[in-house]
Image (tube, grey):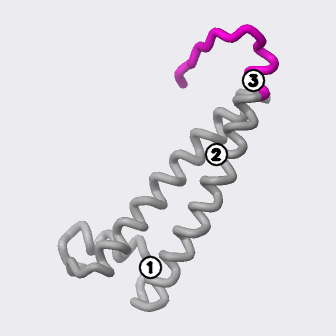
Amino acid sequence: MGVIKLEVPDVVTAIGVLGHLLKRKELLLDRSIFETTKKLRAFEEREGMGSKDFFEKFEKGLAGDDQDAMVWAAEYEALGFLEKERIVVERMLESCR
């Protein structure tokens, strides 16, 4: 794990501000994850296939390249990025406590 060093005049206030900003980011990420998951469920229900299975086919070139397939793949990848960022923010928040 890495260390980030910041020079601030008031450490307690800075940690409070950072914690507040990270909590807000966490809430925004939770909302984005919820919305992206909802979109993925709609694709899954319509196509009768889980997103993970679809994406494996997509990466192999077996899922087509129409607009729906491209959007589905992009939403699936976006969910992965959002979840990774959420983990980082959560760990940073733990350090602010």
Q: Nearer the viewer, mark 3 or mark 1?
A: 3
Q: How many marks?
A: 3
Q: Where does the image place residue 82, in percent across and percent down from the top left?
A: 51, 53
Question: Is 71 covered by the magenta stretch?
Answer: no
Residue located beneath label 1 in the image: 50
Residue located beneath label 2 in the image: 25
Q: Residue farthest to the left?
A: 61
Q: Where does the image place residue 95, in percent across and percent down from the top left?
A: 71, 28
Q: Where does the image place residue 54, in percent across and percent down from the top left?
A: 35, 76
Q: Which residues are magenta?
A: 1-16
Q: Is residue 81 above or below residue 38?
A: above
Mark 3 residue type? Ile
**The N terminus: image quadrant:** top right
- Whole-number angstrom distance, CA of label 3 to CA of label 1: 41 Å
Q: Residue at x 31, y 69 (%)?
A: 56
SS assignment at label 2? helix
Label whose residue precedes the other's in the sequence (2 or 1)? 2
Mark 1 residue type? Gly
